[in-house]
Amino acid sequence: FSNCVGLYSADNVCTVYDMALILKAALDNDLCRQVLTTKIHEIPANEFHPDGLVLSNWFLRKIEDHVSEGLEVLGAKTGYVSQSGNCSASYAENSEGGRFICVTADASGSWACIKDHVAIYEQFCSVN
């Protein structure tokens, strides 16, 4: 990587397999796992946000709304640069103890990312 923020650079090259390895490493780190698996985080009131602030992992919540019973999507992260389109990585477990990482790239939009992940999980990871 030529930068640590994911901004486009001709020297930044990352495959979906590379992203799967990065997500696996992130899930092995306690702090990263906590952030990636948080669905809703509430920030208490402060001088900038007197009423507090509620942050939501919309992508994670939408994937989990559409997968079959017996499969739980536990963590997800999206990304976008024009050169690779909408990309996303997620982690799920099924009721039989199976663990799965799904990474997709070049989706036409955020809903397409969700549909791609749901379709992959349904086809390959659901409990029969």
Image (tube, rainbow, N blue to C red):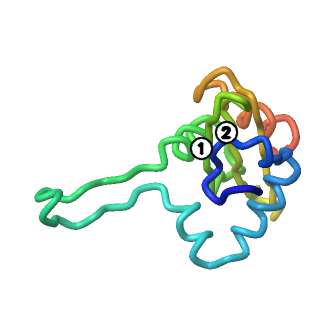
Report helix, strand or loop for mark 1. helix
Find the distance from the CA under tag 2 to the CA under tag 1: 6 Å
Quadrant in which residue 107 is drawn: top right
Q: Which residue corresponds to the image point at 80% horizontal and 48% vertical from the top-left?
A: 11
For label 1, count other residues whose C-alpha is less than 10 Å away and answer few (under 14), some (14-19) or many (20+): some
**Quadrant, the N terminus:** bottom right
Q: Establish if 42 lies above or below 82.
A: below
Residue type at mark 2? Val
The part of the image, by quadrant, that contains residue 24 is bottom right
Front position in the image: 96 or 2: 2
Q: Residue at x 62, y 36 (%)?
A: 80
Which quadrant of the rendered structure holds the C terminus?
Answer: top right
For mark 2, give the secondary structure.
loop
Residue drawn 20% across the image and 59% down it: 52
Answer whether labels 2 and 1 touch (C-beta < 8 Å). Answer: yes
At label 2, counting other C-alpha atoms closer than 10 Å, the crowd grade (few under 14, some 14-19, many 20 or more) is: some
Q: Which disc is residue 90 wearing?
A: none
Residue 93 position within the rendered picture, expressed as x and y whole percent measured from the top left? 74, 58
Determine whether 89 is above or below 66 in the image. below
Mark seen at residue 64: 1
Estimate the x, y position of residue 123 in percent, counting from the top left. 85, 35
Q: In the rendered structure, which amino acid carries the disc numbered 1?
A: Glu
Judged left or right of residue 109, residue 89 is right
Residue 44 at x, y percent in the picture: 22, 67
- Residue tagged 2: 67
Residue at 58% of width from left, 29% of height from top?
110
Task: Determine which quarter of the picture holds residue 8.
Answer: top right
